Amino acid sequence: MKIMAICGSLRKDSYNRALLKIAQEVAPKGVTIEIVELAGIPVFNQDEEESPPKAVKDFKNKIKKADAILISTPEYNYSIPGPLMNAIDTASRPYGENVWDGKVVGLMGASMGMQGTSRAQLQLRQAFVYLNIHTLNKPEVMIGVVHEKFDKNGRLIDPKTKAKVAELVEALVDLVKEKQGSD
Ligand SMILES: Cc1cc2nc3c(=O)[nH]c(=O)nc-3n(C[C@H](O)[C@H](O)[C@H](O)COP(=O)(O)O)c2cc1C
């Protein structure tokens, strides 16, 4: 099973990318998780959607080929970070070529605030309805005050966070199997 992972932050030392690396560590046998970077995807311009650059074609192809997508994102100003929403919009276009259609998506997020990306995640779930994404409902993984859950060297020091990530990956894998079984 191939899971494509997307980090909503471009930051080198992103906590959300660290969570995706933990997802890679805890993934069950036979499941590979590839982190795909959003850097390089241009700001969406509808005038150019019919002739996308290679970075966009590659990004859309990776989504098409993946059995599931795992997103880990921060929250920017109580909302979805621009680079992530830009990538979501980009891969939904042009009309009729929405590669998110029917995809299984798992969602988690980490932020320094108390609510751990609850608002951004809810807004993503809303957009995913229109895109016809099968979003994993539970578990909801919202890691608040994330800077206290990693040490100065970027190592996770909170076992509960690791357990939550593992629970999410397991549920995502189960949902993929359920969907593939019913196809
Ligand atoms: C533009 C911007 C807006 C932010 N807004 C929020 C916010 O609404 N809620 C929150 O909890 N943290 C907010 N933060 C702080 C982030 O939680 C923090 O920078 C976090 O480390 C980002 O995730 P990353 O480590 O994956 O890059 C904001 C950060 C930036 C740069």
Image (spheres, rainbow, N blue to C red):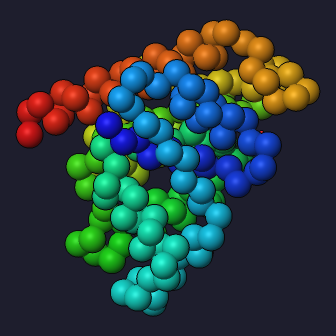
Residue 86, placed above or below residue 49: above
Task: Locate residue 63 relative to residue 134 in the image: left or right.
Answer: right
Q: Quadrant of residue 51?
A: bottom left
Query: Residue 150: x percent and y percent?
Result: 80, 23
Q: Can residue 35 be seen in this view?
A: yes
The residue lying at 33 percent from left, 77 percent from top is: 94
Query: Residue 82: x percent and y percent?
Result: 63, 60
Q: Residue 122 or 84: which is nearer the viewer?
A: 84
Which residue is outermost to the right?
A: 152
Q: In which quarter of the image is residue 151?
A: top right
The residue lying at 37 percent from left, 56 percent from top is: 63
The residue lying at 68 percent from left, 50 percent from top is: 9
Q: Residue 38 or 130: which is nearer the viewer?
A: 38
Q: Residue 162 or 124: which is nearer the viewer?
A: 162
Residue 129, placed above or below residue 26: below
Task: Locate residue 136 relative to residue 150 in the image: left or right.
Answer: left
Q: Is residue 137 visible?
A: no
Query: Residue 8: x percent and y percent?
Result: 61, 49
- Quadrant containing the N terminus is top left
Task: Locate residue 82 relative to residue 168 in the image: left or right.
Answer: right
Q: How many labels does the image show?
A: 0
Which residue is outermost to the top?
A: 159
